[in-house]
Amino acid sequence: MNTLHTIAQLRAALARARQDGKRIGLVPTMGNLHAGHVTLVNKARQRTDFVVVSIFVNPLQFGAGEDLESYPRTLEEDQRKVLDAGGDLVFAPNVKEIYPEGMGGHTRISVPVVSEGLCGASRPGHFEGVATVVCKLLNIVQPDLAVFGQKDYQQLAVIRKMAHDLCLPVLVMGEPTVRAEDGLALSSRNGYLSAEQRRTAPVLFEILQQVAKSVKDGERDYPVLIEAARQRLADSGLRADYLDLRDALTLNPVDADTRDMVILAAAYLGNTRLIDNLLFDLH
Ligand code: PAF
């Protein structure tokens, strides 16, 4: 696998690909790739001719006390997985390459409204860090297409809004969450779970499914429904950070007219923060 570490090397490789008339796809990741990432690479592969997978654990999106230091870094295995999935090139810069003058004075991209609430409320500055690095990666690679996972639903909404507002010439695509057989959404952070926690974790998705089913079956007392779901999370040993029903398109709170909904949750199992969501509609 061809892995490049500098922006200059990457731009040279991309210039050659473009000269050959290739359409460029980008899959931005923080590495420790799993089957969910592989579907993103597959999608980019289907839609473009030259697929770049970036692997960069972005310090700007981690808050104090979060898992920046312990975040799994597995470049060698990741390179193999990218190759197997049909990727053409890994871009794995170090922090100095992306933030040569440090992060303090670096330009930041802030995407208001859609970044607020949910993960934005409990991880201040997180989406600013995500939007900044994604904008930067999009400017470095200048892809025709960039593919992201829907597991980070709010992140995808933030990136779409940024691309729209800043007229970035890229198609942003979201791919459905890939799950383990027991329903747990695949995540690099699942590796932090003990065997017992791993057995408990699928309850998060079960609860989301229950809420969606109740709404589809006609339940409209959303606060009561949400409270019952939070209680079930607590009874199962998870500490809810948030659990909320939102408009799937705007992420605004739902009202009587909302038809496309998403139920989103973040919950702690021990020290591990799991997130998940489920899209459904009332059409
Ligand atoms: O979802 C992720 O892995 C990251 O937030 C992203 C989009 C690669 C930006 O660092």
Image (tube, grey):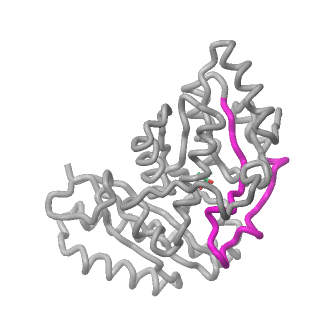
> Does the segment drawn in magenta span residue 67?
yes
Residue at horizontal 44 percent and vertical 56 percent from the top? 111
Q: Quadrant of the N terminus?
A: top right
7 relative to 260, above or below: above
Task: Please indicate, yes or no, whether residue 229 appears anywhere in the rendered image.
Answer: yes
Residue 165 x/y as whole percent: 40, 44
Residue 109 x/y as whole percent: 52, 54
The range drawn in magenta is 51-77
Q: Is residue 273 left or right of residue 74?
A: left
Image quadrant of residue 8? Answer: top right
State the residue in front, 266 or 85.
266
Residue 154 x/y as whole percent: 44, 58
Task: Please indicate, yes or no, whether residue 179 appears anywhere in the rendered image.
Answer: no
State the residue in front, 228 or 156.
156
Q: Is residue 164 left or right of residue 17?
A: left
State the residue in front, 166 or 269.
166
Residue 177 x/y as whole percent: 51, 51
Q: Residue furthest top?
A: 20
Residue at horizontal 50 percent and vertical 33 percent from the top? 170
> Does the segment drawn in magenta span residue 279?
no
19 relative to 104, above or below: above
Image quadrant of residue 4? Answer: top right
Q: Is residue 230 left or right of residue 133?
A: left
State the residue in front, 234 or 96.
96
129 relative to 75, above or below: below
Image quadrant of residue 5? Answer: top right
